[in-house]
Image: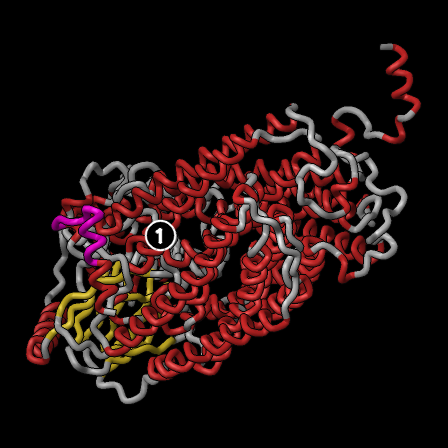
Amino acid sequence: MATATATHEEHHDHGPAKGLMRWVTTTNHKDIGTLYLLFALLMFMIGGAMAMVIRLELFQPGLQFVDPGFFNQMTTVHALVMIFGGVMPAFVGLANWMLPIMIGGPDMALPRMNNWSFWILPFAFAMLLSTFFMDGGAPAGGWTIYPPLVLQGGNGFPFMIFAIHMMGISSVMGAINVIVTILNMRAPGMTLMKMPLFVWTWFITAYLLIAVMPVLAGAVTMLLTDRFFDTSFFNAAGGGDPVLFQHIFWFFGHPEVYILILPAFGIVSAIIPTFARKPLFGYSSMVYATSSIAFLSFIVWAHHMFTVGLPLEGELFFMYATMLIAVPTGVKVFNWISTMWKGSMTFETPMLFSIGFVIMFTIGGFSGLMLAIAPADFQYHDTYFVVAHFHYVLVTGAVYSIMAAAYYWLPKWTGNMYNETMGKWHFWLSTISVNVLFFPQHFLGLAGMPRRIPDYSVQFAEFNMWSSLGGFAFGLSQVFFCYIVYKTIQGGEKATDQVWEGADGLEWELSSPPPYHSFTTPPKIK
Amino acid sequence: MDKLKQFFARSSILAGISGVAHAEYGLNLPVGVTETSQAVYGLHMQILWVCIIIACVVFGAMIWSMVFHRKSQGAVAEQFHESMAAELVWTVVPFIILIVMAVPATKVLVDMHDVSEPDMSIKVTGYQWKWRYEYINEDIDFFSSLDAASNEARQVGSDIDPATVEHYLLNVDRPLVIPVGKKIRFLLTASDVIHSWWVPDFGWKKDAIPGFINEAWVKVDKPGVYRGQCAELCGRDHGFMPIVVEVKSTEDYAAWVQSQKSSAELTNSAVVETLPPQELKQQGKKVYQANCAACHQQKGEGVPGVFPAITASAVVTGEISKHIDLVMNGKPGTAMAAFKGQLSDLELAAVITYQRNSLGNKVGDAVQPTEIAALR
């Protein structure tokens, strides 16, 4: 025992520090990646708990459990937590873990900034969630924080604004790190067009983040001065324009939607070839399609605002531009299917989640195409049809890709295989329940149920009940997911370096788990 | 299209969906009662079918591949990974489909924007949480809010089964009344926050934005009662400001206009007498429940930080002139609206008297409608 300790101490500079301070002061990309991922998991649980409150109240008509004001706080903070605390940090965590390895580098380019960009987040969310305990409660004006409504909020309002500022700073720093890492840390021979698609999609995502997070910061700052410093940016009575806020918000908001989905495209593009045992079909067209989607995301924002009374020409332009997005998105789906075509497929959990992603993200894409048709959008807008649409692209899209990634790389990260039977159970439970949860919401919306209402007319009762039952089951399935992750970290069958038979890429050349510093000497690129 | 309707109808029966409460049960967009709504429905079905057909092709190929190209079936992976031709096909074909979709959509959109030459105009103003309808060039102007039965049933812990309330949450005290077959132009705005006026059977919704006036129009083909809701989150009671439109035949509409005018004259000419405080209090309770309770709560306790309490409030228990001023002129920058435009002299006097002498307050004074009138 004594000898073992001594040996260990001689090599202390090769491994992490011990105890809590390891996590506070770490500049290691894997440690920070782990922190991001665990933080995201915690936020998924908190945001999920809020969703459970929402579905509980909507289980039957009439107000049984919560006050309408509290219901609005739930919908608002659920969205903010899931988007900024769940999906975005989860993708940053995956980027932290995988990008340096995938490009054959030793670590992220800016490790101290990496530490900082993570450690801002717990404080930002502590601040956001603390608003629940303030006079007037948490923000209740919807995650889109439209004035004048949001300006009526209680004491929590400025805290929400500052929390958003902090999240934005964190995201921008993370994005800078990603870009600098990709441009400077690639192993010799790793040309841009040889990078795995996950690297490519994150590269483009990082540019989107840098472009739009400051726009959001500007918008919320104007809200702050409107409320406290007598400006009238969005106050019609003072010569301002409430619709201006929506333009600024959605100029951030639409690229944000792609920030939440482009990394998912990268993940699925890594997993499908592995389990089809066949190279990704149309690699370069995937890169170009991703770039086109990113470009188009800047010129479609007003499709979120078809009903605000835009001029005809404006509505036509935004309708056409929005419809156009279907083309590159379609290219991606067709490429994934061509990758599967004539492959030799097996269906381990990551593959199941990836196939689930392709099918259900496409369903979300179809409803998106329907929403693009401006005259029809006048009916769909602000109904449960929209709720169904964005939950298909965000839950069965973004979140499914994150789960696929977790199962795909967990053996690499921990050195232990997860329990395949449990993983499959998790997939099927989630997939059945998530469809019971969100598919009926299409019907509710078409039949005329507006979103963000705590109570509804009796003709919407049955589908709401199904939806709530699906919601509870989906929520429980994710608790099961936490258990699977916990068991895998604790131990299990040892994973090989290759892990998956058909896996191809630099991460599979390292040991499982990989050494503390990834590639201290650059690998040879084929 | 008819086939699909039948399919939906049949599948709802199969799902065991029946009964009186579910007479309006819908799975699909309503066809509606205007040319516009029918055109929108047509576009909706068209794009839905396009999506369904593409879905069959795409998911069909996936399922085929998953069934036949699996390792357990002994499939050996081929290694092709590029085809310029394929990429071109699946770029160009969707593009053409989109153009085919865009043409009719453009037509409908242009038509919806044509608000010219209306037969009449109605100004719709969104308030937290009711609608106001002003008939331009007619002396008709009234508020429309959630009906009393729904309002009672929707309170937390009311123990009233919503199924027993007729048109639960979709009924109002005074519906908007319009004539059939006339092109009606709506001018939409709001007094406090953004609302959105939506009757699904008319085929559109339009935001009502403070400081701006949006336009939209309808021409309803069929007399009847059509229901909708506010569609833009507008605060605490967003879910409780329905819209009901009664479409009447030309004769019935003319009769309705006449009755409105005579009742308006009656109200205006009625001698406002001095009422005993007890009666003011009684009437005030109703006004309070309909206009104040949503924020200040049923028992006047308010919501800390956003909606001040009425009970033991410095304003309510203080000088009466300040209390009257606050209720009549509101407090800019907050949810406290200026009620002088929303309530009559009698209603204002009643609710102020009620607040001062109820909800845990015992100031003991009262204000008469005549005093309110003098302050206008």
Relative side of B41 to A515, left or right: left
For label 1, count other residues whose C-alpha is less than 10 Å away and answer few (under 14), some (14-19) or many (20+): many
Q: Residue furthest top?
A: A1
Q: Residue at x 43, y 78 (%)?
A: B102
Whether A512 is drawn above or below A277: the answer is above
Residue placed under numbered mark 1 in the picture: A441
Instruction: Kindly state the secondary structure of the residue where label 1 is placed.
Output: helix
B12 drawn magenta: yes
B121 or A31: nearer the viewer:
A31
Q: Position of residue B304 (x, y in %)?
A: 43, 41
Q: Amino acid at mark 1?
A: Gln
Q: Residue at x 40, y 55 (%)?
A: B335
Relative side of A57 to A245, left or right: left
Q: Which quadrant is home to the N terminus of chain A? A: top right
B235 or A475: nearer the viewer:
A475
Q: Residue at x 17, y 71 (%)?
A: B177
Quarter of the rendering containing residue B256: bottom left
Q: Residue at x 29, y 75 (%)?
A: B123
B198 or B340: nearer the viewer:
B198
Q: Position of residue B276 (x, y in %)?
A: 14, 50
A274 or B178: nearer the viewer:
A274
Span highlighted in magenta in the image: B9-20
Q: Position of residue B342 (x, y in %)?
A: 27, 63
Q: Residue furthest bottom?
A: B117
